[in-house]
Amino acid sequence: MTLPKIAYLTGEYPRASDTFIQREVANLRALGHEVLTCSIRTTGVEHLVGPEQRGEHAQTFKVLDAVKSPATTLRAHLRWIKTPGRYLSALGLAWRTAPRGLKGRLYNLIYFIEAGVLAAKLMDEGVTHLHNHIAKASCTVAMLVGALSGIRWSFTIHGPDIFFEPHHWRIDEKAARASFVACISHFCRSQLMCFADAQHWDKLHIVHCGVDPSRYARQPNLNGKRALFVGRLAGVKGVPILIDALAHLSDKHPDLTLRLVGDGPDRTALEAEVKARGLQDKVTFLGYKSQAEVAEELAQTDVFVLPSFAEGVPVVLMEAMAAQVPVLTTRIAGVPELVEDGVSGRLVPPGDAQAFADVLGGLLSDPDLRRSFGTAGRAKVIAEYDAAHEAAWLSNLFCTYATPGPTPGLRPNKGLSA
């Protein structure tokens, strides 16, 4: 069977915080798919932290850069105007699904212009299926590409923020029009089912984000002195909870240090908080790091900490578990589908700083428990969150939906492998 040529679209690709998308693309290519990567905006240099990002950036089609050429934009739209019925229908879709107000209408018209240029590029490249990650603005562009060109399209929905404004982003219309939807967890799928018409539920499949377990094969250094956080330094991640826990545990665990990989809008405020509490010798802000550098950090870590208030299913938890590092995180959204409390890690209520500190202290004092969690965590990731196996399942969906036939199930058959 000839594998469909795929295009991948996100708002900004590649980003240091979205390495799971890069792994997905790489695994699809390894399976034999041609994959054209597309980005609405040009990625900032702060995200090009490793050879993987720099290589993908160089070969990615930048939509807005192309739209800035009047000749390119005019030529693309003249191409689609030759089928006026379809063109006007797509334009009407952009107008009907726009958020309320003049600004919302204007933005959707801009997305329509972008879609015309991207659709022409995909047709010229022989792409037969467009897949989008993150069901916001770039997914609106993908929906309009499908309406203009007839190219099949699908998207991966993550959460949690898309479910804060489901009507704004019209996830009901997107679910109805897409060939299928990849949901990252059962919880995520259930949230989409709140808004998608029941007649479309059978095309909402669960495709996990994944990691390459072999990248994290080294035994971690478990001496009970180092905690690690990897993520965006933004309010949703709950980093002040970590700072509070560190201060609370400093007497009983005077050698405990915290290393934070990532960047974001709250970094300056967090650095000031650390200094105000006299913890600057215990907390290190590392900024964005490459996949190899994160793996090295994990190999030197005793406990991975993620006190988030809202998440989908964090890939950084999968990375830590694959590295046999015990994880401490919050009982939210799809996280319990990955981390089984007391078996492969610990879950605490979100926002409970005292509970987080107490459990962290217990983990630091019990090396045998840390090792047990680490072993169970790696087994869980290998069984259900291997990026190569998830890409094989996604490839199966691309191929199945290319022709009429029965709808696949929620998850792959046991015999499906990379």
Image (cartoon, helix red, strand yellow):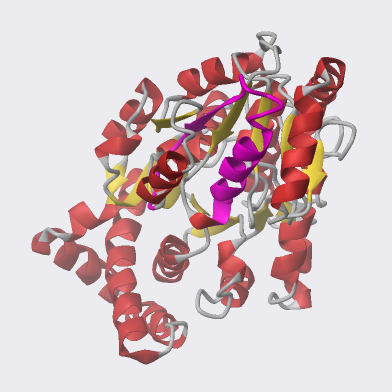
Q: Is residue 220 above or below residue 227?
A: above
Looking at the image, residue 121 sits to the left or right of residue 361; the answer is left
Q: Is residue 145 above or below residue 397?
A: below
Tell me the residue at 82%/23% (across/down): 379
Can residue 103 be found in the magenta stretch?
no
**Which quarter of the rendered picture does the C terminus lie within?**
top right
Looking at the image, residue 98 sits to the left or right of residue 353; the answer is left
- Counting labels gives 0
Pick the front one: 412 or 237? 237
Query: Where does residue 43 sit, x and y in percent of width and height?
Result: 30, 44
Please identify the quarter of the rendering in which residue 406 is found.
bottom right
Q: Which residues are magenta?
A: 236-265
Which residue appears farthest toward the bottom when viewing the image? Answer: 101
Visible in this render: residue 387?
A: no
Which residue appears farthest toward the front when viewing the image? Answer: 251
Query: Where does residue 47 sit, x and y in percent of width and height?
Result: 34, 37
**Which quarter of the rendered picture does the N terminus lie within?**
top right
Pick the front one: 393 or 206? 206
Tell me the residue at 58%/75% (across/down): 166
Looking at the image, residue 342 sits to the left or right of residue 407; the answer is right
Tell me the residue at 67%/29% (across/down): 251
Q: Is residue 259 above or below residue 329?
A: above
Visible in this render: residue 317?
A: yes
Query: Where does residue 174 sit, x and y in percent of width and height?
Result: 56, 70
Pick the front one: 361 or 213? 361
Please identify the quarter of the rendering in which residue 40 is found.
bottom left
Query: Where does residue 41 sit, x and y in percent of width and height?
Result: 29, 53
Which residue appears farthest toward the right when viewing the image? Answer: 342
Tell me the residue at 73%/44% (across/down): 356
Pick the front one: 260 or 380? 260
Looking at the image, residue 376 sits to the left or right of residue 42; the answer is right
